[in-house]
Amino acid sequence: MNPLPPLLDSYGRTFDYARIAVTEKCNLRCTYCMPEEGVDFQGKEKILQSDETLRIIGILGRMGIKKIRFTGGEPLVRKDIVELVSGAAATPGVKAVHLTTNGILFDRYAQSLLDAGLTGVNISLDTLDAEKFVRITRREGLDKVSQNIKLALDLGFPRVKINIVLMRGFNEGELKNFTELTRDHRLTVRFIEFMPFDSHQIWEEGGHFASADSLVKQIETLYPDIQPAPGTRTEHHIFQAPGHQGKIAVIPAFTRSLCGNCSRIRVTADGNIRNCLYSDKEYGLRELIRTGGSDDEIVAVFRKAFAEKEKDGFEAKKTSSAQKVSVEDIVRVSMTQIGG
Ligand code: SAM
Ligand code: SF4
């Protein structure tokens, strides 16, 4: 298929990274993400099927997207996840295919995912304490997730990362236990700022937010000789302690100091483009695909979405709140619906 001109926004930024959510469902119930009863999950017919998702990825590959990340919800609850990964890996233009998972089901698919071309896996794990694991996820599973992180390393996945949402009054005291994992393992531990996408559960209580700057200070105190290291565009602060095999990153997801570098696209599980995590504006692809829309028409929706992308997440948030008329208009309250 012919390459197409790259996706460009009005600030001259081009986009090379797509985060594709493949389900809203999940086998955990993290308190910073979903309530115990789940969120208002959409019917199966509203969720894109693998051939529809792969068609979108094919078009994105022609527009210069080089990296695909499958996420959700929990992407490993999709029984066709290996097919999605191998389809994405075989797409012209796509150089890297990654997955963000809670790790519970990882051993079931790990070897097949590697064989299918998965180049990186981010496993979310917020605590190394079994009792706290149950408190935060409302399910058992610390041993399973820990074993599966080890499995990812043993199988030789090129990139293995641990995502930790760092929250005051919950896991801030575990920062050192996590950073010490980088001493003997070639993985990156990534501390992510808590964001207000928790279905109105604990964000509003206040007091749980720990800023990226405060986390960086704590890391510098723990390792005074720490050195800056190369990382991805969202790994705004990334370091390596002397003699450690792995890296330590801090992601300012809420303070948004990385927006200027944004190179990402999001597609929700129900087939909507989101040009920014903090924007409510959506550009639908599902009906277009299901009513025989051409590739050119799909490309046009992506171009419109990116031409309308705001400069940063603060501007996007302002415009989004201004558009709302009532609380019912806030359609996505959890990262599981937006695609984390
Ligand atoms: N279920 C998978 C997992 O947990 O890795 C993939 C989806 S999850 C929504 C993607 C990432 O978003 C996870 O690393 C999770 O910790 C993070 N996340 C979810 N809710 C968040 C919030 N309110 N603030 C910050 N990060 C959040
Ligand atoms: Fe599920 Fe991931 Fe949300 Fe936790 S963060 S409830 S694992 S989607």
Image (cartoon, grey):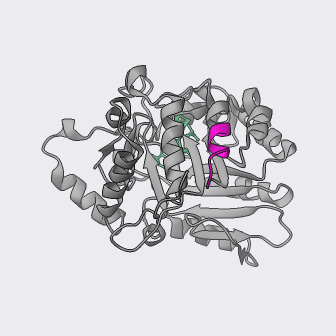
Magenta stretch contains residue 86: yes
Q: Residue 227's quadrant in the figure?
A: bottom right
Q: Residue at x 14, y 40 (%)?
A: 326
Position of 34 compared to 225: left or right?
A: left
Judged left or right of residue 40, residue 19 is right
Q: Which residues are magenta?
A: 85-93
Residue 226 seen from this side? yes
Q: 12 or 211, which lies in front?
A: 12
| 309 to the left or right of 84 | left
Q: Nearer the viewer, residue 75 or 133?
A: 75
**Residue 72 shows in the view:** no
Vertical placement of residue 131 versus 118, above or below:
above
Percent position of residue 230, x then y: 69, 72
Q: Return the x and y of residue 164 as percentages of the image width and height.
A: 60, 50
Asked if 17 appears above or below 224 in the picture, the reply is above
- The location of residue 252, given as percent across then percent down, is 50, 63
Vertical placement of 232 versus 57: above or below? below
Residue 77 on image: x %, y %: 59, 26
Q: Residue furthest front?
A: 2
- Which residue does the image show at 55% across and 63% down from the upper left? 234
Q: Is residue 138 magenta?
A: no
Q: Nearer the viewer, residue 242 or 71?
A: 71
Q: Residue at x 53, y 31 (%)?
A: 51
The image quadrant of residue 181 is bottom right
Instruction: Determine the residue located farthest toward the left in the rendered image.
Output: 325
